[in-house]
Structure formats: C-alpha cells, structure tokens
Amino acid sequence: MAQFVSAGERRRRLVASCIVCAVVALVAGVLIGRASVPTVAERVAGVRVQGNNLATRLSALTIEYEQALTGSGDTVSKGVDEPLTGIERELGAAMDDAPWVTTARRAEVLAATKNVRSVAAAQAPGATFETAVAEAATLVREVLGAP
C-alpha cells in the first residue's frame, strides 16, 4: 500500500539529500586534493635530487671534453655546448623551484656554468676544464642543497 507524502515533504527530502551530497563531495574533494599535492619536504627533496643529478651531468662533461680534444668523440660544440645548454635550462628551472636560492647565488651558479662554457670554447687544457666543471658542480650541489 502506498503512503501519501506531501509535496512539501518531498521538497524537504530533496533539499536535505542535495545538502548531504554536497557535503560528502566537498569532504572527498578536500581529502583527494590534499593527498595529491606534494608536501614542502617532498618538493625540497625533489629539488635536491635534481641538483645532484645536474651536478653529476656537469661532471660527466669532462669525458666528452677529453674526447673532443683528442678527436675521438664529438666536437666541443656537440659534446659540451649542447648538453651544457640543457643543463643550464634545467638548472634555471630547479632554482626557480628552490625559494631559498637568492638572486646573488643564482647569478653565481650561472656564472660558473658560463665559465665552463668559455673554458671549453677556448679549448683549454683538460685539467683547466676539469677544475671549472668541479667548481660549477660543487656550487650547484651547495646552492640547491644536495648533500
């Protein structure tokens, strides 16, 4: 047997169910949003890892430079300049993600990578290039906080 429910009662039930659904959706949205956003510690750790990787890539340029000088690999332009351009681009992005990097420190890091490029362009001896790369890599690790 059907029970009579007035139009006003149906409307109140509809409004109440809409409010309950909205509250559940809001709570679920907040929980999902918080779970998907990285924490500050995770972002800092990511920048540190990226800084360490960039410093390692800088150090690897010494191999390419030696091969370019001996003629057994790519030219200095292909083996050093092109990878260095990518490193500098990624380094800029990493420093943008690191609020602790001051403008002065950023300029210092970019000057060190520019020095690596100028030493390579001058085709200086391998030891001179290694020194410039080591200084730049150490500075990258120091500035981006990589251990």
Image (cartoon, rainbow, N blue to C red):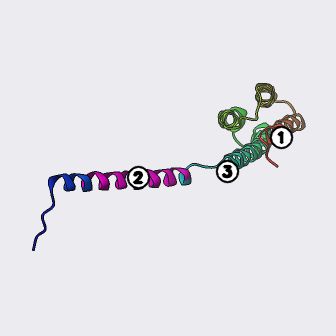
**Is residue 78 or residue 100 the one in the foreground?**
100
Residue marked by disc 1: 142
SS category of the residue bearing label 3? helix
| Separation of marks 3 and 2 at Cα, in angstroms | 30 Å
Residue 8, percent across and down?
Answer: 19, 52
Q: Earlier in the sequence, mark 3 or mark 1?
A: 3
Residue 62, percent across and down?
Answer: 80, 42
Residue marked by disc 2: 23
Q: Residue at x 41, y 56 (%)?
A: 24
Q: Residue at x 21, y 52 (%)?
A: 11
**Is residue 80 or residue 114 the one in the foreground?**
114
| Separation of marks 3 and 1 at Cα, in angstroms | 19 Å
In which quadrant will I find the N terminus? Answer: bottom left
How packed mark 2 is, by other alpha carbons closer than 10 Å (few <14, some 14-19, many 20 or more), is few
Residue 140, percent across and down?
Answer: 79, 38
Residue 80, percent across and down?
Answer: 72, 36
Q: Residue at x 83, y 37 (%)?
A: 139
Figure check: 45 above or below 75: below
Callout 2 amino acid: Val
How packed mark 3 is, by other alpha carbons closer than 10 Å (few <14, some 14-19, many 20 or more), is few
Whether residue 106 appears in magenta in the rendering, the answer is: no
Residue marked by disc 3: 42
